[in-house]
Image: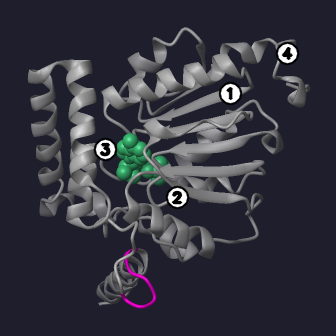
Amino acid sequence: MLHCNFHDLQERCFQENILAATTTSEGRERPDSPAAFSAGRAFWRLIRDSIRHYGVMRTLREVVSAIYRLLRDRLPDRRRTRYGDLDFDFERNVDTTRANVRFRTQLMAALTGHEYFATDPWLFQQIVRALPIQFEDFTFIDLGSGKGRSLMLASDYPFRRIVGVEYLPELHRVAELNIERYSGESQKCGRIESVCQDARDFEFPAEPTVLYLFNPFPEPVFALVLEKLKESLEKRPRPFYVAYRYPEYAHLVGGCEWLEKIAGTEQWLLYSYRENRNPEHKGFESVSRH
Ligand SMILES: C[S@@+](CC[C@H](N)C(=O)[O-])C[C@H]1O[C@@H](n2cnc3c(N)ncnc32)[C@H](O)[C@@H]1O
């Protein structure tokens, strides 16, 4: 009975969150809500990148398997996986679970990128503790930040600032609400923002950075983002780390000779920009102690 009430309560909160995330105070649809987001454009962009990367046949197979994965996840026996991460939200009065993401949004995510899943807090902490850095000097960036759970987890460390990049407006808006609500004694960084943008268009700031990636994109998009990162680092070498959770495309990151693996398990990998070892390098002056 208690269990039932808890879920009813959560469900009501979820509906309110979705409403707040997608409508204005006058009840109109927000201009940046999923209705204004062009799923068609995002879909064709992925198809174009995917054909370039894989060719036509493999692209078709990838689309079919994305739909299959999404539908399989709707089966009743998967319910536990969907609701299994409610503790974080319940304890902090936020909404980061995947359980209440609308089917339409998950379908868009599956067809244009990757589905939304929130980071496991204990794994996140494991990764961050492996970073050999002074947090105060580093900006934390999550590409594909969803509802912003990793941003909140990162704010428990004294990062200089924290940036999340999420291209689905509905998830981005929920992240903004979460950021507003989240506070606690453990929080050590208050400069947090969520940006609603495709990661392929994101310009990396020329700052020492920890880049967090939790299985955000399909392989073709991942390859483009890495290419863009490489150009950015060549132009402005700076201390840089890449934390890769659920390393499905480890071969892509492993193939970047400018990154060096420094730690990891089966569930995550941590890479350091090779120039991190070169303290004399131009661009590292501001973080001389590394
Ligand atoms: C597995 S979730 C990770 C969520 C979050 N990083 C976390 O750790 O809790 C992947 C997210 O990447 C987003 N995404 C997929 N493709 C993207 C793109 N091209 N640009 C920005 N975000 C993207 C999806 O909408 C989804 O929210």
User: Which numbered disc flags the more N-terminal residue, 2 or 3?
Assistant: 3
User: Callout 2: few (<14), some (14-19), or many (20+) C-alpha neighbours within 10 Å?
Assistant: many
Is the stretch drawn in magenta largely helix, strand or loop? loop
Quarter in which the N terminus is drawn? bottom left
* Label 3 near ligand 1 (CB < 8 Å): yes
Residue sticking out furthest to the top: 257
Q: CA distance from mark 2 to mark 3?
A: 16 Å
Q: Is residue 155 left or right of residue 64?
A: right
User: Which numbered disc flags the more N-terminal residue, 1 or 4?
Assistant: 1
Q: What residue sits 23% from the left and 30% below the top?
A: 48
Task: Specify the label residue 279 is tagged with.
Answer: 4
Task: Specify the label residue 149 is tagged with.
Answer: 2
Q: Which residue is mark 3?
A: 114
Q: Which residue is mark 1?
A: 240
User: Which numbered disc flags the more N-terminal residue, 3 or 1?
Assistant: 3
* Label 2 near ligand 1 (CB < 8 Å): yes
Q: CA distance from mark 1 to mark 4?
A: 12 Å
Q: What residue sits 58% from the left and 37% below the top?
A: 203
Corner quadrant of residue 281: top right
Q: Is residue 192 left or right of residue 227?
A: right
- Amino acid marked by disc 4: Pro
Expressed as whole percent of the image width and height from the top left, the position of residue 96 reads 45, 65
